[in-house]
Image: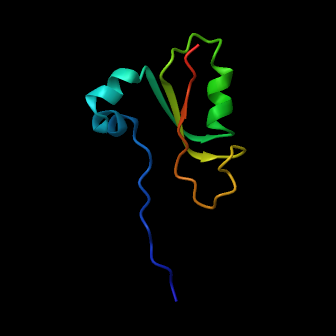
Amino acid sequence: MHGAQVEMELLDRDRILAELTPAARSRLSRLEVYPTLDSTNSYLLAQVGADWPSGAVCLAEQQQAGRVHESPRVMARLALSSGG
């Protein structure tokens, strides 16, 4: 018996931006999408000193060491940079 094939839609930066409401878009200063990161939160924290503005968002299809990495099907984890 063969399992059913499931087509997985990957994160698409342009599509995400197009789907945001104007209010949400106005709060977003930067959006980055990666196939894999150790942790989206750790990645953003490492960028704090690199002129990243408040409202920066990082998405990853998969995390290797983040809080959600134990999940067998990690779709994405959203982490917002702190305004500082």
Query: Residue 66, image x and y in percent?
Result: 69, 43
Quadrant of residue 40 in the image?
Answer: top right
Q: Position of residue 18 (x, y in %)?
A: 28, 35
**Which quadrant: the C terminus?**
top right
Residue drawn at the location 27% of the way across and 28% of the way down: 22
Q: Toward which corner of the image does residue 26 lie, by quadrant?
A: top left
Q: Position of residue 43 (x, y in %)?
A: 65, 29
Q: Is residue 15 left or right of residue 40?
A: left
| Above/below status of 80 relative to 66 | above
User: In the current view of this chain or complex, which residue is farthest to the right?
Assistant: 65
**Residue at the image position 55 percent from the left and 43 percent from the top:** 77
Give residue 62's position: percent from left, percent from top: 59, 48
- Is the residue 63 above or below the residue 48 in the image? below
* Lateral position of residue 77 relative to residue 71, left or right: left
Q: Is residue 22 left or right of residue 43?
A: left
Observer-nearest of 1 and 46: 46
Identify the residue at horizontal 55%, vertical 15% (top origin).
52
